[in-house]
Amino acid sequence: MSNEKISLGERNYAPFAERYAAATETNAYNGHYERPATLSLLPEVAGLRVLDAACGPGFYTEWLICRGARVIACDVTPAMVEIARKRNPGVEIRRHDLEQPLGWLADSAVDLVLMPLALDYIADPARLFREFHRVTSPGGFLVFSAGHPMTDWLIFGGAYYDTARHAIEWKGFGEPKPVIDGYRRSLQDTLNPVIEAGYVIERLLEPRPSEAVRRVNPESYAKLAEKPAFLCIRARKL
Ligand SMILES: C[S@@+](CC[C@H](N)C(=O)[O-])C[C@H]1O[C@@H](n2cnc3c(N)ncnc32)[C@H](O)[C@@H]1O
């Protein structure tokens, strides 16, 4: 595969998948901030058929399985797929690039599509949300999180309204520091593709940091108390 054929997500995460898995299980931003916020938007999951899209190390899959959901998961980065499979033996976890159609899922195959922290690596959210809508059963849910449009704009600058590609070095994952390349979008360009795909947005969360975040990392707490790092959304296919 030439480098251009390797998806943005894989280029970002392949070099430090193990380090990402080790750090994000209990770190402030993921383990104590984004994950509890996104999980708070889920309906009762027992018995639901769930697609954990861009599952990464499989923390969400594990949480769902423990609560009686039937999960199928996917990720584009082979090392993440391996880590998620080890964490969730017996669960079907596929290597799949979400820029491609979910040909292996029938219409209405799942009751919930969950996609935490992966939208920023997707070139065409409208196409992806249409595909999620196709595989979601009537009455089913879409829950996802993404970089907060305002906060990311404060970091990267430029014209707020334009979708732009930015690369940034991440601290907190050891050396060499990973360089993460992704898309920053306005709020309307984040949410309108969800609505245009046919979903109704039910709940939008700009999470505040908890006391647990303060305990784990007071510096992160101070930043997050001023501005949210992520946007978490629950939408429904009526
Ligand atoms: C920030 S991690 C989030 C992982 C997991 N959702 C979580 O919150 O623990 C982003 C994940 O998205 C995956 N990813 C990025 N682009 C993708 C794509 N086009 N198709 C499938 N997975 C993708 C990466 O491989 C990585 O595992």
Image (cartoon, rainbow, N blue to C red):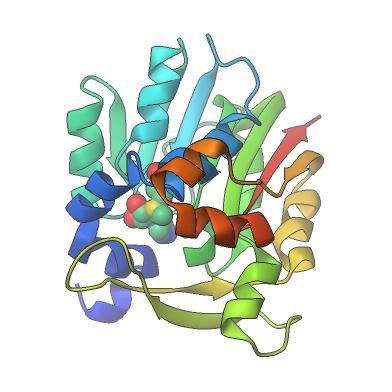
Residue 157's spot in the image, x, y percent?
Answer: 63, 86
Looking at the figure, which quarter contains the N terminus? bottom left
Q: Quadrant of residue 42?
A: top right
Residue occupying image coordinates x 36% and y 34%: 59
Most extreme residue toward the bottom, as rendered?
Answer: 158
Residue 227 in view in this figure: no
Residue 23 in view in this figure: yes
174 or 121, nearer to the observer: 174
Residue 211's spot in the image, x, y percent?
Answer: 55, 38
> Is 166 rendered above or below residue 8?
below
Residue occupying image coordinates x 49% and y 44%: 213
Looking at the figure, which quarter contains the C terminus? top right
Residue 173's spot in the image, x, y percent?
Answer: 26, 61
Q: Quadrant of residue 185?
A: bottom right
- In this rendering, position of residue 167 left or right of residue 141: left
Residue occupying image coordinates x 20% and y 22%: 89
- In this rendering, position of residue 12 left or right of residue 37: left
Q: Quadrant of residue 64?
A: top left
71 or 104, nearer to the observer: 71
- Total number of numbered labels? 0
Residue 116's spot in the image, x, y percent?
Answer: 51, 46
> Is 193 rendered above or below residue 65?
below
> Is 100 rendered above or below residue 156?
above
Residue occupying image coordinates x 62% and y 15%: 44
80 or 212, nearer to the observer: 212
> Is 231 rendered above or below residue 234?
below
